[in-house]
Image (tube, rainbow, N blue to C red):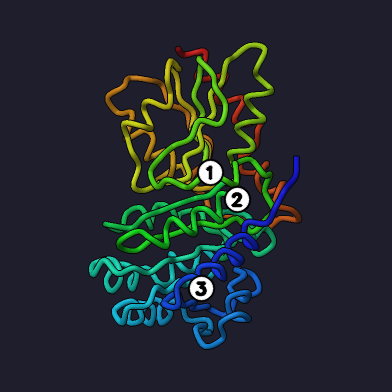
Amino acid sequence: MSTSSLRNAYGQTLVELGHENQNVVALEADLGKSTMSCLFEKEFPERFFEMGIAEADMASTAAGLALAGKIPFIHSFAVFTSGRAYDQLRQTIGIAGLKVRVCGSSAGLSDFSDGSTHQSVEDIALMRAIPGMTVVVPADAAQTAAAVRAIANVDGPAYIRICRNNLEDLTDPSEPFVIGKPVIMRDGSDIAVYACGATLAMALKAADMLKDKISVRVINVATLKPIDEAALIAAAGPCRGIVTAEEHSVIGGLGSAVSQAFALECKPIGFVGIEDKYGTSAHTYEELLAYYGITAEHIAEKVEAIYKRV
């Protein structure tokens, strides 16, 4: 299976949007070579604003640009765009419903070497809690490109969560990104696994591992807010149990969103994610995922545990 960079796909698509709409501008917090906003800077230096290591100021400046009719995209590591600038995202951008697009790059555990201070395990929860905030978590490079285009057109603020590492190419590049719509990636009739971002490939592998004994349906939930709850429930089809898999805390992320949707459905739900812990440093991304129990094997184990209950 081939892999591609979500960061490159993001940066290239942002440049395309810049050519299509002169109101698109980019703001950066001194991490342009990591977030790939540097591609926009190279193409449109007059529409690029280097704010330094000052995410709060960046968000406030973006609010002013939005009020002036611009479409600002702001960039930093996910832990900083969601955490350092939270007050500005809520008070200045969120309450006013401004069209600011927030890129949380190097999300989850993907900045594996820098430890807990640089790893975002709670950013989805923070962004989902802001009223009116759209939250998307693409699973590969093609979906990243489509998602960037989709959030460019939404009313109000939007947050996109980007993995630092290359991920497997899983989605159809010609498929448009429909905000709120879950997509069935693999059919199955026993257990439905809802995954987002980096865990989608793991969920598909887990389904393969179990194919001789459990029929696993895999659903890509690339929009964490807003969620079409009716479509989310319908995507499970005949499955009698649910598993969610995410590279995020099990509190406030995909697991919380799915369990809320299924609250009246009386189906057992199991959660794969980070268990109320901070991140830590490691030699590789894969080492960290294994340490926190976010692998195809862990998803398969959770599927088996839920299957025994249905």
State whether residue 175 is above or below residue 232. below
* 301 or 81: nearer the viewer: 81
* Disc ID at residue 26: none
State whether residue 302 is above or below residue 91. above
Of mark 2 and mark 1, the one earlier in the sequence is 2
Quadrant in the rendering for residue 159: bottom left
Secondary-structure class at tag 2: helix
State whether residue 170 is above or below residue 232. below
Q: CA distance from mark 3 to mark 1?
A: 22 Å
Check the image and name the residue furthest to the left.
95
Q: CA distance from mark 2 to mark 3?
A: 18 Å
What percent of the width, then of the height, locates residue 199? Answer: 59, 40
Kindly identify which residue carries mark 3: 18
Tag 2: Cα neighbours inside 10 Å, few (<14), some, or many (≥20)?
many
What percent of the width, then of the height, locates residue 308? Answer: 52, 13
Point out the image quarter for the N terminus: top right
Kindly identify which residue carries mark 2: 142
Amino acid under disc 3: Gly
Kindly identify which residue carries mark 1: 175
What percent of the width, then of the height, locates residue 277? Answer: 52, 49
* 65 or 196: nearer the viewer: 65
Amino acid under disc 1: Glu
Secondary-structure class at tag 1: loop
Of mark 3 and mark 1, the one earlier in the sequence is 3
Point out the image quarter for the C terminus: top left
Check the image and name the residue furthest to the bottom.
46
What percent of the width, then of the height, locates residue 191? Answer: 50, 20
Asked if the residue under mark 3 is in contact with the one under mark 2, i.e. CB atoms within 8 Å, the reply is: no
Of mark 2 and mark 3, the one earlier in the sequence is 3
Tag 3: Cα neighbours inside 10 Å, few (<14), some, or many (≥20)?
some
